Image: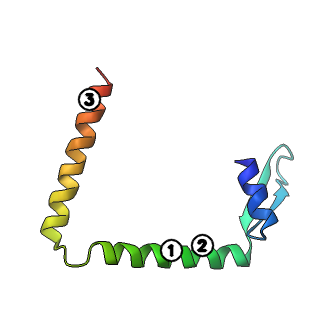
């Protein structure tokens, strides 16, 4: 995690500072550039989801979700045996 945060800091997307309440910890926050990038990624993700689900009605979406949950439950049950 530290390496990732350092890379983001190097790219100007985050900034780090020592936690004033406990100097054993480092706090990290997005910079304005990081906030802009995060907003752009959210928008791109939303557009991708809209393209992916274009023409799929809610009933079909619900059916797919139920089926995926059943598959996950089956795998969970199998791994717990």
Position of 17 compared to 50: left or right?
A: right
- Say whether marks 3 and 1 touch (CB < 8 Å): no
Q: Is residue 28 above or below residue 21?
A: below
Q: Quadrant of the C terminus?
A: top left
**How packed is label 1: few (under 14 Cα within 10 Å), some, or many (20 or more)?**
few
Q: Is residue 81 above or below residue 39?
A: above
Looking at the picture, how far across and down is residue 35, in whole percent? Answer: 65, 75
Name which quarter of the figure residue 48 lies in: bottom left
**How packed is label 3: few (under 14 Cα within 10 Å), some, or many (20 or more)?**
few
Tell me the residue that label 2 is attached to.
38
**How packed is label 2: few (under 14 Cα within 10 Å), some, or many (20 or more)?**
some
Q: Secondary structure at mark 1?
A: helix
Looking at the picture, how far across and down is residue 64, in whole percent? Answer: 19, 58
State the separation of the CA atoms marked 3 and 1.
34 Å
Figure coloring: rainbow
Name which quarter of the figure residue 37 lies in: bottom right
Q: Secondary structure at mark 3?
A: helix
Q: Is residue 67 above or below residue 49?
A: above
- Say whether marks 2 and 1 touch (CB < 8 Å): yes
State the separation of the CA atoms marked 3 and 2.
37 Å
Task: Using the image as rendered, state which of residue 27 and residue 72 is in the foreground.
Answer: 72
Q: Is residue 11 above or below residue 81?
A: below
State the separation of the CA atoms marked 2 and 1.
6 Å
Tell me the residue that label 3 is attached to.
77
Looking at the picture, how far across and down is residue 38, in whole percent? Answer: 60, 73
Tell me the residue that label 1 is attached to.
42
Residue at 72% across, 78% down: 32
Sequence-first tag of 3 and 2: 2
Residue at 28% across, 34% down: 75
Position of 36 compared to 65: left or right?
A: right
């Amino acid at each position: 995690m530290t390496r990732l945060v350092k890379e983001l800091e190097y790219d100007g997307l985050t900034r780090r500072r020592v936690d004033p309440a406990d100097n054993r910890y480092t706090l990290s926050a997005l910079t304005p550039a990081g906030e802009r990038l995060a907003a752009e990624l959210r928008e791109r993700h939303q557009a991708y989801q809209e393209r992916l689900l274009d023409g799929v009605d809610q009933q079909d979406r619900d059916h797919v979700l139920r089926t995926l949950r059943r598959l996950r439950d089956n795998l969970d049950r199998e791994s717990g045996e």
